[in-house]
Amino acid sequence: MSLQEDALILHGLDDAIAGESDCGRLIYDYNKMLRIFIRQGMSETEAIEWIDYNVMGVQCNGKGFIVLYDHDDIDIKEATETFPLTSN
């Protein structure tokens, strides 16, 4: 595969790359990004806030990258209450 021209490569987060999508974007592992920022001296809370505002905030106009979240970190009950599954 090859990356799309508009795919974003995040500086300093090479160790968090989990792979490449079939649509030509890099896939970054959220937990690995978190560990990278903690190793740089941030607290866990600071690292989460940094990712939320400074990493996720660089995606615009549908361009960018994909973030992989660990299944254990996802609250399925909360997700289905917020976005109910519908049957057609």
Image (spheres, rainbow, N blue to C red):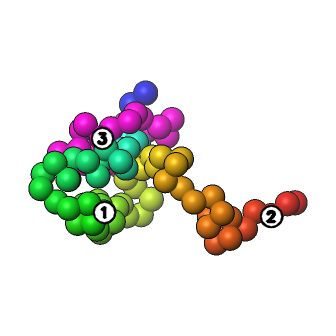
Residue 8: give x, y in percent of width and height. 31, 49
* Mark 1 → mark 3, Cα distance in angstroms: 15 Å
Horizontal arrangement in the rendering, residue 83 relative to residue 25 (left or right):
right
Q: Which residue is mark 3?
A: 16
Q: Earlier in the sequence, mark 3 or mark 2?
A: 3
Q: Please tell me which residue is depicted at 43% across the width and 38% down the height of the picture.
A: 24
Residue 27: give x, y in percent of width and height. 40, 42
Horizontal arrangement in the rendering, residue 85 relative to residue 68 (left or right):
right
Residue 40: give x, y in percent of width and height. 12, 51
* Mark 3 → mark 2, Cα distance in angstroms: 34 Å
Residue type at numbered disc 3: Ala
Q: Earlier in the sequence, mark 1 or mark 3?
A: 3
Dots 1, 2 in contact, CB < 8 A: no
Callout 2 environment at 10 Å: few (<14), some (14 to 19), or many (20+)? few
Q: Point out the image quarter for the C terminus.
A: bottom right
Horizontal arrangement in the rendering, residue 60 relative to residue 45 (left or right):
right
46 and 5: which one is in front?
Answer: 46
Instruction: State the predominant SS element of the stretch in magenta.
Output: loop
Quarter of the figure with residue 4: top left
Q: Which residue is mark 1?
A: 48
Residue 64: give x, y in percent of width and height. 37, 53
Q: Which residue is mark 2?
A: 86
Q: Earlier in the sequence, mark 1 or mark 2?
A: 1
Q: Secondary structure at mark 2?
A: loop
Q: Please tell me which residue is depicted at 24% across the width and 38% down the height of the picture.
A: 14
Q: Secondary structure at mark 3?
A: helix
Please state which of the two labelled residues, at mark 1 or mark 3, is closer to the viewer.
1
Residue type at numbered disc 2: Thr
> From this viewpoint, is residue 44 visible?
yes
The magenta stretch is 3-24
